[in-house]
Amino acid sequence: MKLSAVPTHAKERKAERPAPDSRGTFYTRTFSDLPAEAKNIREEVFVREQGFTEEFDEIDAKAVHILLFFGQKAVGTCRFFQSGGSWLIGRVAVLRAFRGKGCGKMLLLAAEQEIRNNGATSCSLHAQCRAMDFYTRCGYSPCGEPFDEEGCPHILMQKFLGK
């Protein structure tokens, strides 16, 4: 099921996040609804760059969404949600101009902290096999065999978060 409409003003979950500034600092904000900026980043990365066609699904309605900002510009996003007692991180996307600057790691750390805040000690994700080295450097370990998602090989990876 695809989501056809995204609210113009997504509801921000955490008011204590830093306010936007123009000095060029990175910070994250967490939302209970899919923000338009996250939708735009995912369309750019997954649809236009990588050719996926089924980018939006019913999980977007129940997931928590994180946006990474550089100054006032949204440059990356991810989502996390609980499924069958496990926490999953997904749709990690960073705009091309901001790759290689630690943005993906910042998104993962923000999601992991939120998951930890919910009492969990581990989380998992479906990594594109070509990004497996990145997730390994971030502390994730592969589990099982690769599988296909829209013609792209993925692998389940897990991380112990501690207490």
Image: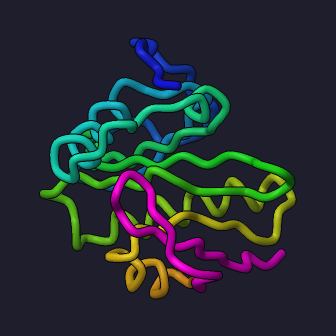
72 w.r.t. 139: above or below: above
> Which residue does the image show at 34% across and 53% down from the upper left?
93
| In this rendering, position of residue 122 left or right of residue 26 | right
Residue 50 horizontal side relative to residue 91, left or right: left
Question: What secondary structure do most residues of the magenta stretch adopt?
Answer: strand
Does residue 160 show up magenta in the picture?
A: yes
124 or 116: which is nearer to us?
124
What residue range appears in magenta? 141-163
Residue 21 makes an appearance in the image: no
Which residue is outermost to the left?
A: 97
Picture layout, residue 153 above or below residue 115 = below
Q: Residue at x 56, y 20 (%)?
A: 11
The picture quadrant where one finds residue 48 is top left
Residue 53: image location, x then y, percent: 31, 38
Residue drawn at x 46%, y 24% is: 2
Taking the magenta stretch, the answer to whether it contains residue 97 is no
Q: How is the structure coloured here?
A: rainbow
Tell me where residue 22 appears, x and y as whole percent. Answer: 22, 41
* Residue 117 position in % (x across, y down): 78, 55
- The answer to whether 80 appears left or right of 151 in the picture is right
Residue 77 pos. (x, y %): 40, 47
Residue 110: in sight, yes or no? yes
Task: Give the quarter of the figure containing the C terminus.
Answer: bottom right
Rendered residue at 49%/86% (across/down)? 136
26 or 146: nearer the eye? Answer: 146
142 lies above or below 161: below
What is the tally of numbered marks visible in this picture? 0
